[in-house]
Amino acid sequence: VRLVDAYKVYIDVGGIYNFQYTGQLQSTNSSAKNIDIWLARDGVDIGYSTRMFTLSGSGQYLSISFNFNIDVLPGSYIQLNWASDSTNVDLHASTAVAPHPGTSSSILAINYVSALPVILPTPP
């Protein structure tokens, strides 16, 4: 598994992988914002993979999580995409301020689960 650019995770060894994502969103004004997060494999959106979140209130934070298993061929890549209906939301990171260390905006953990099945599943 290697990260070639800021948003593509390349898989060198094919198999079933478990991806665990956690992000921290911040609202910068009081209106409600809808945020969608979804998967793409080799640049193609995975059907029914979208998770929807709503955030409102100025200065409000929302911790989001996304856990999924997906089959990946060697040389393929996975993307976790997100979009919002507002520019007043961001993935928030902060520097260390006593008494706590810095806060990351996103964390991604990837675990190999098993070899690929003989017949790959057909995406929706």
Image: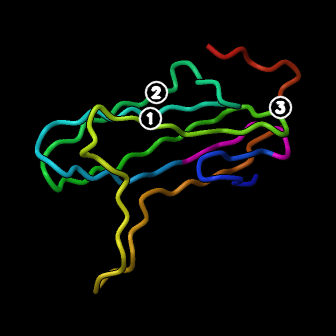
- Assess whether mark 1 and mark 2 are in contact (beta carbons under 8 angstroms): yes
Q: Which tag is nearer the camera, tag 3 or tag 1?
A: 1
Residue under label 1: 37
Residue type indicated by callout 1: Ile
Residue 40 at x, y percent in the picture: 61, 30
User: Residue 70 occupies which quadrant of the picture?
Assistant: top right
Main structural element of the magenta stretch: helix, strand or loop? Answer: strand
Q: Is residue 66 depicted above or below 99 in this figure?
A: above
Q: Which numbered disc, 2 or 3, marks the residue that appears first in the sequence? A: 2
Report whether 94 appears left or right of 104. left
- Assess whether mark 1 and mark 3 are in contact (beta carbons under 8 angstroms): no
> What numbered label is drawn on residue 50?
2
Q: Is residue 102 depicted above or below 23 in this figure?
A: below
User: Residue 34 occupies which quadrant of the picture?
Assistant: top left
10 Å crowding of disc 3: few (<14), some (14-19), many (20+):
some
Residue under label 3: 116
